[in-house]
């Protein structure tokens, strides 16, 4: 198998060049990548092994599995202790400062790699990789747009699969089925040691107000204490809202989208809160240009919520989320983060999801979520699906 058979070599070269410029800016001589997400970004496929990226020169892909990859910069080894000798044999000078992904790599792995490079100072490369991945290339944007189209196609079918008497989990299973048939990979990559979720988060009625230990915008009790988030088996009854936040990973790059469905009439307060969510998105779409502070976007949303008198319900009722948006890509929670204390500043070709949501006791969760590309003219929506509350009848 040719190493770059899945992703054009020119695309990989652009990504490596971007990483190398950031390595130089941080005063690091090289980085060694072990995380699957970052391996995929730098290679276009996942391998078991290590990716070595020097500040100058070609990267080396140290591979354990799979067998059969071919390329001048492929080196098969069975343990990291062999890396220094292989680098020397290829004419590479061992780094004085080596970057490792300290935020996402286990302590034991870090200690082992430190022992492999005993003369090296160790720096954290986690932020470098997150910042590199935050600004998408044209190919990445194409893949995200493709995911958005298929994601919207799945949502258009939801009213047709609902049956009276269904539980939230029964509806979720049907959504997951049509999603997989549409081409969803079923994988939900999340950054963070304690972030877990299945393919979708479907919240019916007051289950939306059940707090979860995870740092998501909405909660739910879940079906079991081992995964306390999402659908809990509630029967969908008249007067309830049903919020659907389903996986949009159709290309290896994820879109994030939430839509709200209703069974029967829901309260005027819930309808008004949903309209406020749409209004917030319209305001932030105009505001979201390169150079905009993420914290300013959050404050603009809060202003709109307060003007509507809905702050008690915003981003949760019993437990509130501390953000209204986040970057998306290979992982569902990338940079930038739209939060009050965020230091992120929007850059052109950032891709982010905005999710200003509300919980109304006795009804459930309302509000939308869209995925956007940051452009010079504002935010370009790539999850094109009706935003008003959709009837299941």
Image (cartoon, grey):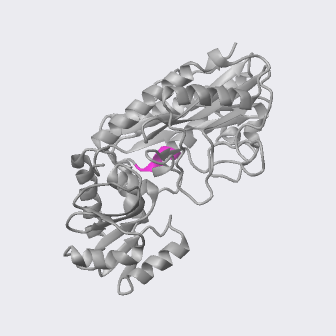
Residue 315, located in which quarter of the rendered image?
Answer: top right
Task: Indicate the quadrant containing the C terminus: top left, top right, bottom left or bottom right.
Answer: top right
- Which one is in front, 280 or 58? 58
Looking at the image, residue 349 sits to the left or right of residue 391; the answer is: left
Residue 86 seen from this side: yes
Secondary structure character of the magenta stretch overall: helix
Does residue 79 lie above or below 217 as drawn?
A: below
Instruction: Residue 52: give x, y in percent of width and height.
Output: 32, 67
Query: Which of the two residues, 348 or 117, is positioned nearer the viewer here?
Result: 117
The residue depicted at 62 percent of the width and 27 percent of the height is 175
Q: Is residue 69 above or below residue 75?
A: above
Q: Position of residue 117 (x, y in %)?
A: 37, 82
Q: Position of residue 1 (x, y in %)?
A: 30, 49
Residue 378 as seen in the image, left or right of residue 102: left
Which residue range is magenta in the image?
293-298
> Foreground residue, 283 or 188?
188
Q: Is residue 10 above or below residue 282?
A: below
- Picture coordinates of residue 242, whole percent (x, y): 69, 27
């Amino acid at each position: 198998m040719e190493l770059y058979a899945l992703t054009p070599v020119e695309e990989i070269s652009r990504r490596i060049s971007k990483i190398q410029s950031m390595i130089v800016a941080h005063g690091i001589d090289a980085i060694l990548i072990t995380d699957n997400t970052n391996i995929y970004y730098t290679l276009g496929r996942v391998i078991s092994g290590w990716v070595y990226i020097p500040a100058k020169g070609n990267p080396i892909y140290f591979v354990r599995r799979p067998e059969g990859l071919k390329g001048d910069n492929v080196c098969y080894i069975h343990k990291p202790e062999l890396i220094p000798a292989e680098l020397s044999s290829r004419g590479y000078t061992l780094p004085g400062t080596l970057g490792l992904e300290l935020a996402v790599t286990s302590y034991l792995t870090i200690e082992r790699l430190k022992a492999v490079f005993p003369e090296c100072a160790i720096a954290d490369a986690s932020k470098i990789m997150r910042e590199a991945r935050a600004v998408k290339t044209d190919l990445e944007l194409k893949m995200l747009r493709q995911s958005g189209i298929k994601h919207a196609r799945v949502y258009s079918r939801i009213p047709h699969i609902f049956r009276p008497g269904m539980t939230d989990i029964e509806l979720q299973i049907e959504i997951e089925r049509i999603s997989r048939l549409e081409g969803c990979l079923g994988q939900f990559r999340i950054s963070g040691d304690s972030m877990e979720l299945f393919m979708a988060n479907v919240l019916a009625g007051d289950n939306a107000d059940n707090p979860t230990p995870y740092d998501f915008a909405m909660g739910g009790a879940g079906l079991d204490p081992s995964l306390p988030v999402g659908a809990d088996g509630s029967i969908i009854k008249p007067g309830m809202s049903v919020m659907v936040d389903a996986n949009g990973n159709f290309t290896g790059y994820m879109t994030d989208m939430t839509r709200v469905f209703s069974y029967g009439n829901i309260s005027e307060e819930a309808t008004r809160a949903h309209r406020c969510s749409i209004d917030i998105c319209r305001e932030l779409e105009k505001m979201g240009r390169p150079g905009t502070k993420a914290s300013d976007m959050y404050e603009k949303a809060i202003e709109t919520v307060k003007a509507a008198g809905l702050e008690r319900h915003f981003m949760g009722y019993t437990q509130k989320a501390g953000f209204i948006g986040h970057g998306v890509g290979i992982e569902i929670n990338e940079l930038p983060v739209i939060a009050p204390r965020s230091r992120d500043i929007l850059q052109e070709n950032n891709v982010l999801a905005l999710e200003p949501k509300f919980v109304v006791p006795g009804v459930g969760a309302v509000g939308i979520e869209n995925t956007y590309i940051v452009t010079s003219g504002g935010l370009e929506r790539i999850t094109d699906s009706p935003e008003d509350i959709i009837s299941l009848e």
